[in-house]
Amino acid sequence: MDNQLETLRHSVSQMQQELEARLDAQSVRSEALYSRLEALIMANRTIVQNTPRRQPGETDVVGGHPYVPKPKLEPPKCDGSVPLRWLYKVKEYFDFYATPPDERLRCVALMLEGSAADWFRWRMTNRMISDWDDFVAKFKLRFDPLLFVDYFGQLAKLRQRGSVMEYQEEFEKLLQHITGASEDILISVFHAGLKHHLQQELSMLKPTTLSESFTMARELEAKHSALLQSVHSRPYSTGAGGTKGPVQGLRAATTAPLLPTPTTTPQLAEPYSGREISQGC
C-alpha cells in the first residue's frame, strides 16, 4: 500500500515538473512573439511617419505610372433570351477586370437567371462543363436559335424596303454574326441591297469604308427626299380670276379648221330682183 502511494506521488511530481517546464517554454515563446510584434508595430509606425501625405486628387504610383482604381461595373445578367449579346458583354466584363478563365464559371453562376440559371446549375452539378470555352460552346448550342444559320447568305439577300437607316440597322444586325469577310466585300453587298437610284450615285462617289457607305447613302436619300418635296410643292400659274391657265410665256395653241371657210362678198349677199326672177320663169 505504501509502495503504491509512493509511486503515485512520484508520478504526480513528475507530471508537475513536466507541466512547469512546458509553461516556462510557452512563456518564453510568447515573450518572443510579443517582442516581434512590438518590433513590427514600431517599424510600421516609422514607415507611416516617413511617408508623405497624399494631396487631394493625388493617386498611388505603381511601376512608375499613377494607379487609378477601376470603376465598379454591374455584372451583365442573362436569362437566355439574348445569348450572343450577353456573351459579348460578359467577355468584355471579364477582360476589364482581368478575370482568369478558371474563375469565370464561378462568376457566371451569379449572372444567369431563369431557365439559363437552371440549365447551368444542372450542367455544373453533373460535371458536364469542363472550362470557360466549353461553357461558351454549350451555351450557344442551348440558347442561340440561329447558331447554324448562314448569316452571310442572309446578308447577301437583304434588300432595302424602307429608309436607308432601317436597311442599315438590319444589315448591322446580321453583320455582328459574320467574321472573316473583307470590308470590300461587305461594301459591295451593302451597295447591292440599296434602291437602284442610290446604287448608281453611290458607285460614283466610291466610298472606301463601310461607315462611309452608310453615311453617304443616308445623305443621298435625304437629298432625293428634299428634291421630290420641292417639286411637289411648286405652285401652278393662275389667271386673273384665280382659275388655272397656261404658264406665262407660252402661246396658246390654235386649232386649224378641217374644211376651208368660204368668203362672202357684198355682191353675193345682195338679194335677187323681181325682174330676174320673172325672166327665169
Image (spheres, grey):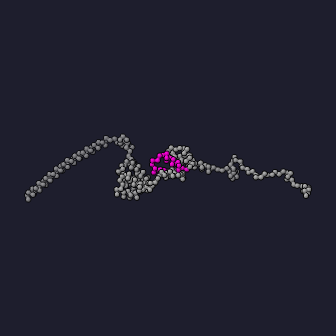
Task: Tell me if residue 11 can be seen.
Answer: yes
User: Residue 254 vs residue 5: left or right?
Assistant: right
Residue 247 colored magenta?
Answer: no
What is the x, y in percent for residue 268? 85, 52
User: Residue 169 vs residue 5: left or right?
Assistant: right
Task: Tell me if residue 274 can be seen.
Answer: no
Quarter occupied by the C terminus: bottom right
Residue closest to the eye, 266 or 195 = 195
Most frequent secondary structure within the magenta stretch: helix
Image height check: is 56 above or below 144?
A: above
Residue closest to the eye, 273 or 43 = 273
Residue 193 colored magenta?
Answer: yes
Residue drawn 38% across the image and 42% down it = 66
What is the x, y in percent for residue 174? 48, 51
What is the x, y in percent for residue 115? 40, 58
What number of labels is visible? 0
Residue drawn 75% across the image and 50% down it = 256
User: Residue 257 vs residue 275: left or right?
Assistant: left
Quarter occupied by the N terminus: bottom left
Residue closest to the eye, 123 or 77 = 123
Residue drawn 90% across the image and 55% down it = 276
The residue range painted magenta reads 171-195
